Image (tube, rainbow, N blue to C red):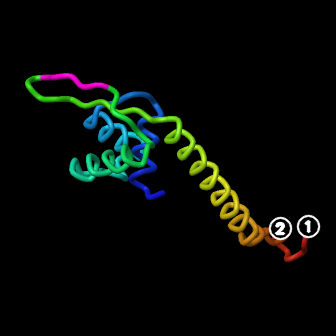
Amino acid sequence: MNENTFWILTALAGGRQHGYAVLRDVESLTASKVSLRVTTLYASLERLERDGLVRRAGEEIVDGRARRYYELTDDGTQALTLETERLSVRLGAAQKRLAAARPAPIRPAPATMAWGFVG
């Protein structure tokens, strides 16, 4: 699963949203580290809909513009769940290796007294 798909599905896991709300939610979830373009979002939503991971969940007119809502399907929820489990395994393995690779803390030398004797 690519990163855009992951974040779109994650945003929709919070419930039904229209496209612009998904954009804002992805930015919020990622602390602005991922910023989807509108064209990227809608192309992704169309693909995810074709793949059966999201579905249209209504439409309304706001200020003369159509606002289309999307939600996860059961398959979308399952795909996101499997991806989070896969990422969790990867994260755990990397953390374990990093912890094992850390050098032992350096112990300070024993304190010496002013006369040069170890105390």
The residue closer to the viewer here, 83 or 101, is 83
Residue toward you, 39 or 34:
39
Position of the C terminus by quadrant:
bottom right
Kindly identify the residue that appears in the image at 52 percent across and 41 percent down.
75
Q: Is residue 90 left or right of residue 80?
A: right
The image position of residue 18, as x and y in percent, is 29, 32
As drawn, the residue found furthest toward the bottom would be 116
Vertically, is 51 above or below 117?
Answer: above
Along the horizontal axis of the image, is 62 left or right of 118?
left
The secondary element bearing badge 1 is classed as loop
Q: Work out whether mark 1 precedes mark 2 in sequence or the reverse, and give the earlier one.
A: 2
Residue at (34%, 50%) from the top-left corner? 47
Distance between mark 1 and mark 2 Cα atoms: 6 Å
Q: Which residue is mark 1?
A: 119
Q: Residue 57 versus residue 62: which sits nearer the camera? A: 57
**Mark on residue 111?**
2
Which residue sits at x=37%, y=47%? 50
Q: Are marks 1 and 2 in contact (CB under 8 Å)?
A: yes
Q: Which secondary structure type mostly characterizes the magenta part of the structure?
A: strand
Identity of the residue drawn at 46% across and 41% down: 10
Rendered location of residue 69, percent (x, y):
30, 30
Tell me: residue 111, above or below residue 46: below
Any magenta on residue 12? no
Amino acid bearing label 1: Gly
Q: Could you tell me the amino acid type at mark 2?
A: Ala
- Quadrant in the picture for residue 61: top left
Tell me residue 52's x, y (percent). Answer: 43, 43
Horizontal side, residue 40 vs residue 73: left or right: left
Residue 42 appears at what percent x and percent y? 26, 46
Toward the left, the furthest residue is: 64
Highlighted magenta segment, given as a residue range = 58-62
